[in-house]
Structure formats: C-alpha cells, structure tokens
Amino acid sequence: MSAPERRGTTTVSDRAVRRIAGRAVTEALPGRAARATGSSAAVRGGRAEIAVDVALPYPAPLTPTVRRVQDHVTARTGELTGLDVHPARVGVTALTPDRTTEPDGAPETAPAPFRGRVPRRWWAQRRLPLGVLTLLATLTCGALATDLILVHTGHRPAALWRTGALHWLYVHGPGEPPVTAAALGCALLGVWLIVLAVTPGRRGLLTAHFPVPATRVAVDRGAVAALLRDAAAGTEGVDTVAVRVRRRSATVRAALAFGDRTAVRDQIADAARRALAGCGLRRPLRLRVAVRPLPVWTPPPAEAVPAPLGAVATAGGS
C-alpha cells in the first residue's frame, strides 16, 4: 500500500485562495472595522500571489496598519492553503470611521525608519491596451499563418481576403488619400503606444514611504482627501468642507459659521498638516487653506473695530 501523501493530489483553486485572503483581512485587526472590498489570487504550482483591496478604520496610522494587514493576510493564507504565498499586495480603497481602541489598550508602535528607494509614481500595468494589441496581433498572425499552411500543405488557393489585400496594395500608391489616412492612423497608434510605455499612469495614486524593503505602497487621492476633510471638519466653527487633492498640492476650502477667521484657518492648516504627515507620502503636498465666512457669520467681539480715543457719543438735539 502506498503512503497517504502519494495517493492523490490536492489542488487549491484561485477562487478558494481569494476567499481565504478576503476573510483574513477581517481577522488582521481584532476589534477594528477592517474589511476587504476586493481580492484577486493566482496559483501557479505550489506558489500563490494575492492582492486585496481593503477599507481600513479611521483614525489609525496608515503605514503600520497596512503592514499588519499585509503580514496577517500573507501568513494566514499560507497557513490554511499550504502554499508558498508571496507578500500580499494591499490597496486601501476606503477609510471607515472607527473610534475603537486596541484590545489591550497599547498604543500604536511607531514605524521603523524607511530603508530603500520609493518610486515617485505608481506605474500602471496597461492591461487593456496590451490586451487589445495582443488580441489583434494574434488574430492577424493566426489568420495569415493558417492560410499559408492550407496553401502549402492542403494545395488550396489563397484566401480571398489575402489576395484582395495584395491587389489593393498593388493598385494604390503612397500618395492616394486612403493610403495616407492608413499611414497616419498607424503613426498615431504608434505614438500612443510609446506614450503609454514611457508614462506611469495611475494618476490617482500617491506613493508613500514604507519601512519594509522591496515593498511599494500607494495611497489613493480620495483617501487623502477624506483624511483632510475629516481633519478640517473637526475644527470648531466650520460648517462645510471641500477638499481637492492633486499630484503635488492639496486645497482645503471651509465655510465658517462662527469664530475667528484667522484662528480657524490656522487650526485647519495644523490639522491638515498632521493628517498629511500621517500618510507618509514620498512627495509632500503643498497645502492651501481657504476659509470663507457664511452669510450668517458675524465677527467675534475681539475683531470689532475699537472707537477712536477721545470720541464722545451724543444723542438728541442741537
């Protein structure tokens, strides 16, 4: 009788690994509102690559929280599947309000100093253009190869589409409008492919420092905008807040209902700087804060203009 381990083969599907990784996200932060918003997995032999999109609790230090989720998802998935799991790719897609503290009441540990080089931009994989180009090239080369094989091995006449294309190219010269238009289209397609190859893409992601070597981290602009919006909305006297985050700058516009305008603007700027510092962005954003008083706003007594010295108020007749 053969040994038990030789009686069969256990295969773990991509779907099972993906579900395990998504479930492991909820276990990474006990007592905190962490959940998976999307996940993907690829199993090749005894190795697996996983990626998860998560919604993390706010407020919480972003870098150590992501690192904890990454370590737990990688270890838990490898433990339950028996596969050799690469470090999970974690993308933060949302921040959910959560005031719950750690179960043991211990403060968050500060991240270790960063080591290594952080990319300035997050490069896109260009899956759609690459897939379309690969599909067109495969269909064209496949059709041509099939026709040539049938002609030389099956002694069949050449396909009408191939002879028609050759005849059209023979009777049309380079100066004719159809040929010129086709050449211009090919040139524009080539320029477009070159631009895609040399530009990073993923303009909505901002790269951040991470203490673990050979690990890349990016923060979505929407997440940064949500942090700044929450930081500004917590200032006393602020009614509404609008935030716009660009690649190199962030603008916070607040509507003031009451309070000192200058003091509120300074408080918003300090809170916004602390929020940006917590993101650990590789390229710090230039911060601009604008405070606009609402129509119902009245200046506090400290801002009232004092009467000139020696002035005497009078009332009544001459």
Image (tube, rainbow, N blue to C red):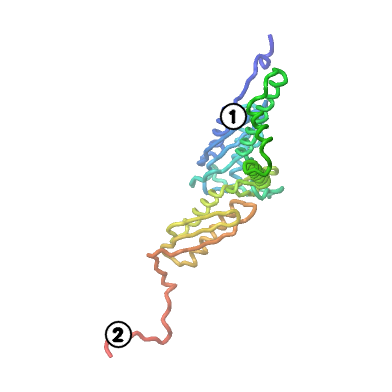
Label 1 residue SS: helix
Q: Position of residue 15 (x, y in %)?
A: 57, 28
Residue type, numbered disc 2: Ala
Count residues near mark 2 (Cα–Cα under 10 Å), then give few for <14, some for 14-19, many for 20+. few
Residue type, numbered disc 1: Val
Q: Position of residue 79 (x, y in %)?
A: 62, 29
Identity of the residue drawn at 67% across and 17% down: 5
Does residue 42 appear anywhere in the picture? yes
Classify 276 as above or below 264: above
Q: Find residue 216 and report its image quarter.
A: top right
Q: Which quadrant is the C terminus positioned in?
A: bottom left
- Between 67 and 133, which is closer to the camera in this rendering? 133
Q: Position of residue 278 (x, y in %)?
A: 59, 52
Mark 2 lies on residue: 315
Q: Position of residue 191 (x, y in %)?
A: 66, 46
The numbered disc on residue 17 is: 1
